[in-house]
Image: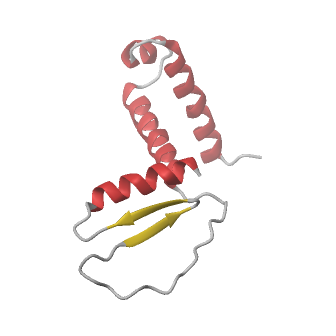
Amino acid sequence: MLSPKEQRQREWEVRVSDFKSSGLKMTHWCSANHVSLEQMKYWTRKFKTISAIASIAPSKSFIPLIAIEPAPRTATSSLVVQVGFASIELHPGFDPQLLREAVEAISRSC
């Protein structure tokens, strides 16, 4: 049996889903369905946040990390980062934002 909080969340999941599939503007849908516009905005944001967190949460699959003895650093040394079967070679002065984006893209496809 669902708690009152879980029941309310389920009801709002249905309402938000109905709204999104309706093709109506939020104000029109809320008016037609006797739902508070502010509550609809709140629950829409809440489910968007929950969805975003779920999409970045670590998956339950395990990706092994293999530690390799590093080679001595030289002026031309590089670092190789392995994500699953993909590897990324980094050189001094690499762009950290580009690395983040690459790792995220690779992680999503693994």
The residue closer to the viewer here, 65 or 77, is 77
Side (left or right) of 76 relative to 53: left
Q: Measuring 40% from the left and 19% from the top, which residue is drawn there?
A: 26
Name above or below for residue 19 compared with residue 95. Answer: above
As drawn, the residue found furthest toward the right would be: 1
Observer-nearest of 73 and 103: 73
Which of 52/108 is in front? Answer: 108
Q: Position of residue 34 (x, y in %)?
A: 48, 17
User: Residue at coordinates 46% horizontally, 49% vertically from top-left?
Assistant: 105
Picture quadrant where residue 46 is located: top left
Quarter of image, res 81: bottom left
Q: Residue at x 44, y 34 (%)?
A: 44
Q: Is residue 82 visible?
A: yes
Q: Is residue 107 above or below residue 22?
A: below
Colour scheme in use: secondary structure
Q: Establish if 71 lies above or below 41.
A: below
Q: Residue at x 44, y 57 (%)?
A: 103
Side of 109 where 7 appears, left or right: right
Question: Which x, y percent locates residue 66?
Answer: 58, 77
Whether residue 53 is visible, yes or no, is no
Q: Quadrant of residue 76?
A: bottom left
How many numbered marks, from 0 up? 0
Q: Give the image location of residue 4, x and y in percent.
A: 64, 45
